[in-house]
Amino acid sequence: MLQAIDQYPSRRREDISPFPRNEPVIHGRDWQSCRSSDGPLTTHQMESYEEKGFLWMERFFSQEWIEPFFKELKEIARSEKLRKRREVIMDTQGDEVKSVFAMHTLSKRFAEIFSHPDLLSVVQQLIGSDVYIHQSRINYKSGFQGSGFEWHSDFETWHTEDGMPRMRAVSASIMLTDNNPFNGPLMLIPGSHKLFVPCQGATPDNNWQQSLKTQKVGSPSEEIIGQLAEENGIEAPTGPAGSLLLFECNTLHASNRNMSPWPRANLFCVYNSVENRLERPFSGKDPRPDFLGARENTRALRAIR
Ligand code: 6CS
Ligand code: FE
């Protein structure tokens, strides 16, 4: 079978310089032609997302409404049976859970929040089409222990290891606990989504078994991160549980270890356009398991009220 032309080559032996993305940040005809917002986000919010590659919406859900989600995470993290599943990734520090993938298949409560009408309409507005869940997960950092994440663009991994053809996916991150400057909030480089930053070095077989604990390949050089951070700065949105961070699939991000006593748990749902379903991985390797990049259930989501 012929492999589609790779618009975003990465993980090659040679060093490829960053280059501009060759597609819009906000998709859909209305936005391209008249730049007026046709959905819940205002034109100002859309412009800010387009410029920075992320949008912070404090108290999108109420703290009380979000509480049961954190409780359920703690039950999962305590259950010996669940801890043995492949969707559960253990932290290299201590004896705690680091990530739980495919939350929408493990729990009805989580499946429903991802189809909440307020969330779905915002995401559809940015993606400009129907969407399905490419990946969902919780990243958990226990107090004093929880480890961090290296700098990366999610799209770089999803393109190379999962075969996501284009940049037409959005991560919605819902804070399940408060995020403060001390408990390892997500850091982003504004504007970094405008460039594709290829990473050097071949993808090892079954790379995910390593990369979900500590990422080695797929993280840009310190030189490039340094340049981009010098030019654009770094932002780390913080706020109470229930806040929402929307970020574009190609925005560079990372996070620190949690050195505070306060746990940090963030829920993520990656929405992909139904017009951007996965192909063969551009690394030439086998596709990753479905809980990391969906190929089986890619039906368009409908709002659940
Ligand atoms: O490999 C992945 O798909 C994941 N890894 C990271 C570090 N971020 C996004 C995604 O969950
Ligand atoms: Fe990421």
Image: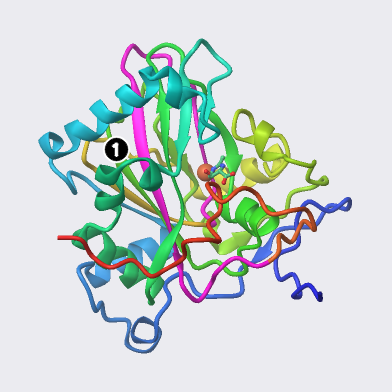
User: In the picture, which quadrant includes the C terminus?
Assistant: bottom left
Q: Nearer the viewer, residue 225 or 278?
A: 278
Looking at the image, residue 247 sits to the left or right of residue 197; the answer is: left
Residue at the image position 46 percent from the left and 17 percent from the top: 96
What is the count of numbered marks?
Answer: 1
Residue 282 screen position, x and y as percent: 74, 61
Residue at the image position 30 percent from the left and 30 percent from the top: 179
Q: Is mark 1 on a helix, strand or loop?
A: strand
Q: Nearer the viewer, residue 99 or 41?
A: 99
Q: Nearer the viewer, residue 156 or 228?
A: 156
The correct choice, above or below, for 264 with respect to 26 in the image is above
Which residue carries the number 1 mark?
175
Beta carbon of the mark 1 residue lies under 8 A of ligand 2: no
Question: Is residue 27 in view?
Answer: yes
256 part of magenta stretch: yes
The correct choice, above or below, for 28 with respect to 139 in the image is below
The correct choice, above or below, for 129 with respect to 213 in the image is below
The correct choice, above or below, for 207 with respect to 274 in the image is above
173 part of magenta stretch: no
Q: What stretch is highlighted in magenta?
A: 250-279
Q: Residue furthest right?
A: 13
Residue 35 screen position, x and y as percent: 32, 81
Residue at the image position 43 percent from the left and 17 percent from the top: 80
